[in-house]
Image (cartoon, grey):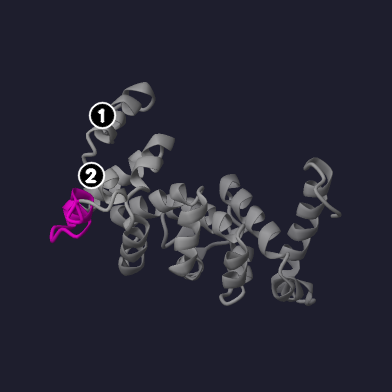
């Protein structure tokens, strides 16, 4: 599937896998096939097998039908969260797992599972470990990990439980540093996260303190408020 050209050819190949329930996700949803191929591959003794499994999951999760099929597996999100948190290196395995989780985070129940697994704390720690230079370049993390990590953080911070978890870690410090990046997509995700978490009184109070560290965040939060109040449909007072 991963090597099939994107578009219709890949969707056709993916649908063949789904129709045949190759990974056993449909059987898992029915409470059958506890020893399914998906679980076997994720727990393989071979790091290469696990990496290729993660690559397949990440590729399939790019399609709506793939996400629907894979999320039938009752333990998939928990398995991915476990692998992500155990893998110390920003390697191909971790990047594929992170990419898959970000795509699954578009849905409500996987969001709950990721928040329960304390992924917000993991993301903030991982992003905080990167060295963001004055030129806006990042050392220590790949561009893929930074982009998908900030996208996942934004998706999880939309939930009330995610916002509460963001209060327990240095979220604002990390977001402040990421605002210096040249990557416009990352800055979009950072701004989206700020718009979500700054509704929490604890985090809003941190931003209101007059110190240089939060000056950028103050400016960003005021700009975001103006943008959202002006261009988004009104659902209440801004």
User: Residue 211 in magenta?
Assistant: no
* Residue 228 on image: x %, y %: 77, 48
Q: Quadrant of residue 60?
A: top left
| Cα–Cα span, label 2 and label 1 | 12 Å
Counting every numbered tag in the picture gives 2
Give the number of the disc on residue 16.
1
* Residue 214 on image: x %, y %: 72, 70
Position of 190 with respect to 110 (left or right) is: right
* Residue 213 on image: x %, y %: 69, 72
Q: Where is 211 relative to 132, above or below?
A: below
Identify the secondary structure beneath mark 1. helix
Q: Quadrant of the C terminus?
A: bottom right
Give the number of the disc on residue 230.
none
Q: Where is 173 relative to 100, above or below?
A: below
Position of 121 with respect to 47 (left or right) is: right
Residue closest to the far top: 8
Asked if residue 103 can be seen in this view, the reply is yes
Range of residues picked out in magenta: 33-49
- 120 or 34, which is in the foreground? 34
Give the number of the disc on residue 23.
2
Residue displayed at 17% across by 55% down: 35
Residue displayed at 82% across by 48% down: 229
């Amino acid at each position: 599937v991963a090597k099939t050209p994107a578009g219709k050819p890949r969707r056709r190949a993916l649908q063949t896998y789904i129709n045949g329930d190759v990974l056993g996700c449909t059987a898992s949803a029915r409470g059958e096939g506890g020893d399914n191929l998906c679980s076997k591959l994720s727990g393989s003794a071979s790091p290469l097998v696990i990496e290729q499994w993660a690559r397949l999951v990440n590729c399939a999760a790019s399609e709506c039908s793939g996400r629907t099929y894979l999320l039938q597996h009752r333990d998939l999100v928990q398995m991915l969260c476990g692998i992500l948190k155990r893998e110390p290196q920003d390697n191909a395995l971790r990047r594929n797992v992170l990419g898959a989780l970000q795509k699954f985070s578009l849905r409500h129940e996987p969001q709950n599972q990721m928040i329960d697994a304390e992924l917000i704390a993991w993301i903030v720690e991982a992003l905080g470990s990167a060295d963001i230079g004055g030129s806006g370049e990042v050392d220590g993390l790949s561009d893929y990990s930074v982009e998908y990590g900030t996208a996942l953080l934004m998706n999880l911070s939309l939930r009330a439980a995610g916002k509460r978890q963001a209060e327990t870690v240095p979220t604002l410090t990390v977001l402040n540093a990421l605002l210096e990046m040249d990557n416009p997509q990352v800055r979009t995700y950072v701004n989206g996260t700020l718009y979500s978490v700054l509704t929490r009184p604890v985090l809003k109070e941190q931003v209101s303190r007059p110190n240089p560290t939060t000056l950028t965040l103050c400016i960003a939060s005021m700009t975001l408020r103006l943008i959202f109040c002006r261009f988004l449909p009104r659902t209440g007072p801004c």
